[in-house]
Amino acid sequence: MKAVIMAGGKGTRLQPFTASFPKPLMPLGDMPVLELLLHQLRRAGVDEVYLAVNHLHHLIRAFCGDGSRFGLSINYSLEDSPLGTAGPLGGLLANMGDDFIVTNGDLLTTFDIAALIRTHLDRGSDATICVYERELKIDFGLIEVDSDMNLKGYLEKPMSKHLVSMGLYVLRRDAVAPHVSPGVHLDMPDLLLKLRDSGCKVQCHRQAESFWLDIGRPEDYATAQKMFEEQRELFLPG
């Protein structure tokens, strides 16, 4: 199995740290999040990785090298200009197998990637989106009114649950091919909707026991550092 890691973003939500440091190399204790991801992919049976890089790409190349110290073969795809979260696939698709993984370079999760691959293949899906349930709380009292501004309802700091994309996918090469082109900007939500609209089988996969954090948010990054220090075995089981 091959994987594409999207590692070209500027990490604007973590500035000023990411002004001189690519977000995939942000540390979790003694290990950058990208290194953790590479170990997890290797454990799931991935043997070849393509890193789509742009921002501070020389630092990522210097750290990862050819991938041999991770038990992987690592190749690089340099974007001359930002291509979005799916655009780099246009220039990489010919190197992929029938099915392949796409992931964000800052993914922090305990998701069982091997189980994800099996589920995708068993279902015969064209695309599988990994999803995670998050609670969203609004820190205000919400007022409901009618057309004449009469009070209809009052919700004090409501909370709702939603499934969100984790930035981890398995895609079928032949399904993706008609929708991507080398050098053309495309974001993953747009690609997935194109697949759906063309009649492809696009499914979601959730593992209730798994954990995921968006480390692009400073508060989540702080939580991630603490969790990795205290429960390292959750992310790197023996």
Image: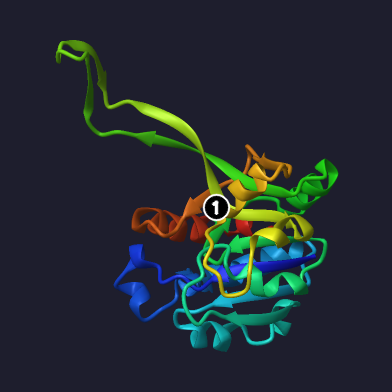
Q: Quadrant of residue 235?
A: bottom right
The answer to whether one can see residue 238 in this image is no
Q: Position of residue 93 (x, y in %)?
A: 72, 69
Q: Residue at x 56, y 42 (%)?
A: 132
Q: Position of residue 229 (x, y in %)?
A: 50, 61
SS at mark 1? helix
Left-right relation of 55 to 151: right
Quarter holding the N terminus is: bottom right
Residue 107 vs 139, above or below: the answer is below
- Camera-side residue of 97 and 166: 97
Colour setting: rainbow
Q: Position of residue 200 (x, y in %)?
A: 73, 45
The residue beneath circle 1 is 190
Q: Residue at x 22, y 13 (%)?
A: 146
Q: Amino acid at mark 1?
A: Asp
Left-right relation of 234 to 149: right
Left-right relation of 66 to 162: right
Left-right relation of 71 to 109: right
The answer to whether one can see residue 26 in this image is yes
Q: Residue at x 76, y 74 (%)?
A: 95
Residue 81 vs 46, above or below: the answer is below
Q: How many marks?
A: 1
